[in-house]
Amino acid sequence: MASIISRTRLTLLSFLVPTFVLAQDFDHGYIDPTPILAAASAAIGEDRLSCISISGTAYSGKVGQQYINAYEVDWPRGEPLRNYTRVIDFENVRMIETFDREPGNNPASWKYGLGWYGGTPIQAEDRQIFSLNGQYAWHQDGSNGAPIAARPLDAERWQLDMWLTPHGFLKAARLPGANPVAAWRWELGEMGRDGATVNPEKVTIVSITLLGKYRVDATINSENLLQRIHTWVPDAVIGDTNFEHEFSNADYIDIGDRVRFPTNWHHHTGWDDNYQAQSVNAGHNAFGGRQADIVANECPGEVAVPTNVRNADFSENVEVQTLADGVYLFGGSSHNSVVVEFEDYIAVVEAPLYEARNLAVIDEIAERIPNKPIRFLINTHQHHDHIGGLRTYMHIGATIITHWKNYDFYTKDVLNYSQRTLDPDMVSLWPPTELAEGYQYEVVRENYALTDGDRIMQLSYVHPLGHVEGMLVAYLPEEKLLIEADLFDATTSMLPAEATAANRTLYNHVQRLDLDVETIVPIHGQPTPWDDFANLIN
Ligand SMILES: [Zn+2]
Ligand SMILES: [Zn+2]
């Protein structure tokens, strides 16, 4: 009898134990990622591919450079990327991307997606080379161009671009710390990719962690193909930003040895939010194209990290020039800020680039003019390379003065309480009460003046021009200074041979308002005598 009882108990135990373990391993809503990853790997021959070379053509979207940021549904389309090639070595984390692009229109280090702000001069050569080796990334303008180190967050994003490929994702799922988890759902499809899908398809989503902080997920369909690989990347303007590559089943081609790879690339930076349901800004298409020339197991070679890239110093360089009594140009970067001291407060024109730049400028202001509040931040226009520090100025208590056409975008998408998890800024860490109170703006329609009774600064709206809508310039009549962004750049000592449409707009604006300007103070480049500029126009 006794032996029978104990056997029964054993049977019960062996039946119960696995059930108990399963319940522990996978919470409600979750499933085992192991067989899903194995099936996806087998479907595309993941284990037989260590390197890949893809070639074709591509397009790029100018992220953050819309004409009107509110109510436009996409980023403006950039110059075509011709002779596009990408060569990846997954195991050694190396990648080289090359393409030809029309010079003269882009910051040289801008690839596509984010990173438009660069910090480098305008692209001079056709050929562009972007290299990655582990944590290091760099850019060359022309085949013999000097290597320029990518900022660490850009280097991480370029590396993510490598892992956000079907084979890359499956390999990354095995890296230490990836910790894959899986879930299932019925997907109704994406209109742009699949047309109006009627029948829902059961898909699985496998999510992994990369570089210790990026949550990357792949949607794997009923044919075990990765159709969407998605993550979030940090951005100074809009915070944690949607970043995804999409592939349709038809894109996958056989490249030999039972390896399959997609030929069409479709990339989003930002949400494909055509109805502007979540955000005012709906820019999303940032890269895409057809790279049908695919070679399996062709590797990029050594990709040796240049010494200057390995030792690159990204600390902010702030150089101060006195323009007049109490008026200073804070330069030393690709974008200037102009500091104007009033009796009881300080006003700053422009909060460009990203938070680190603005914190360095603010610390320098506080050192030179201690114990006077920075009361106002004047913003020229909404292009992302000119607003990456708006939140930083809000953090230190400044009121933002901008054209009214930028108000919706700034309120909803930029100056909000949304958590920024990947690269938290000051407002995200210490949200100030003013955000909820709503008194952080002054909006300008045509004209606005700041004065202490002695000094005066006049702001005026520059009527519609090709570059952007909602542009302000600042004029100091006593000092005869005109502060402007992007209407005239003086980044080289040589004046250009021919005036641009934006130059003419600036000239006409000054004539119409009858401003007596002696010196133009550009956000890009050096102060320039008005007469030199006027000679360019006439
Ligand atoms: Zn601009
Ligand atoms: Zn600019």
Image (tube, grey):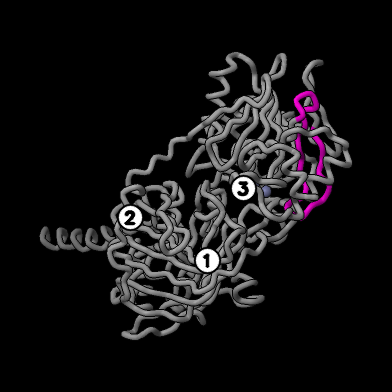
Q: Quadrant of residue 28?
A: bottom left
Please tell me which of labels 1 and 2 falls first in the chain.
1
Q: Secondary structure at mark 2?
A: loop
Measured Cα–Cα span from mark 1 to mark 2: 26 Å
Which segment is the magenta one? Answer: 459-480
Name which residue type carries label 1: Asp
Which residue is the site of mark 3? 494
Measured Cα–Cα span from mark 1 to mark 3: 22 Å
Mark 1 close to ligand 2, CB under 8 Å: no
Which residue is the site of mark 1? 126
Name which residue type carries label 2: Gly
Query: Residue 308, how many percent across, how many down?
Result: 35, 47
Which residue is the site of mark 2? 134
501 or 345, nearer to the observer: 501
Which residue is found at the position 28% from the left and 62% from the top?
92
Measured Cα–Cα span from mark 2 to mark 3: 39 Å
Whether the magenta-drawn stretch holds residue 463 is answered as yes
| Residue 320 position (above or below residue 120) | above
Please tell me which of labels 1 and 3 falls first in the chain.
1
